[in-house]
Amino acid sequence: MAGVRDSFWWEKLSPEEQQRVENEEWPAGETARYLSDHTRVEVEARVVWARDGEEWVRGHVTRWVRPVVLVELHDRRRQRVWLPAGDVRRLIDPGPDRDPPPEGEPVV
């Protein structure tokens, strides 16, 4: 299928860099595999690492199928992961006249 970016990204990471994500949640069925990427949405994602524990990691969302979103993390331990939408919040540039929202805005 043209334009489909398949997921063999994990093979590029060394075993000590890659880490399992405890709150990973895959979408139901095979449909999400064939989705085209959406416009990138900058986010912070709550990631529960198998070894390092919970932390918020910056990244961007490119695909979503309720109730999960595909987050491309800005982190060497894992590059992409499907997470529950409730564990992802949109980053908003507050601009000069606005304060940032207290807990971010949900992605979907």
Image: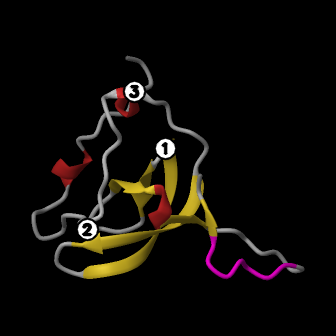
The CA distance from mark 1 to mark 2 is 25 Å
Secondary-structure class at tag 3: helix
Location of mark 3 (residue) = 34
The CA distance from mark 3 to mark 2 is 25 Å
Task: Name the kind of residue labelled 3 in the image.
Answer: Tyr
The first of marks 3 and 2 along the sequence is 3
Secondary-structure class at tag 2: loop
The first of marks 1 and 2 along the sequence is 1
- Provide the residue span drawn in magenta: 98-104
Task: Name the kind of residue labelled 2 in the image.
Answer: Arg
Secondary-structure class at tag 1: loop
Please tell me whether mark 1 or mark 2 is closer to you in this view.
Answer: 1
Please tell me whether mark 3 or mark 1 is closer to you in this view.
Answer: 1
The first of marks 3 and 1 along the sequence is 3
The answer to whether residue 59 shows anywhere in this view is no
Task: Name the kind of residue labelled 1 in the image.
Answer: Arg
Which label sits on residue 29? none
Q: Position of residue 36 (x, y in %)?
A: 49, 31
Residues at discs 3 and 2 in contact (Cβ within 8 Å): no
The CA distance from mark 3 to mark 1 is 15 Å
Residue at point 56%, 66% (across, down): 89
Q: 10 Å neighbourhood of mark 3: few (<14), some, or many (≥20)?
A: few
Whether residue 87 appears in magenta in the rendering, the answer is no
Question: Considering depth in this image, is 12 or 26 the residue closer to the camera?
Answer: 26
Question: Considering depth in this image, is 14 or 68 the residue closer to the camera?
Answer: 68
Q: Please tell me whether the stretch drawn in magenta is mainly helix, strand or loop.
A: loop
Res. 71 image quadrant: bottom left
Location of mark 2 (residue) = 77
Location of mark 1 (residue) = 66
The answer to whether residue 7 shows anywhere in this view is yes
Q: Position of residue 67 (x, y in %)?
A: 46, 48
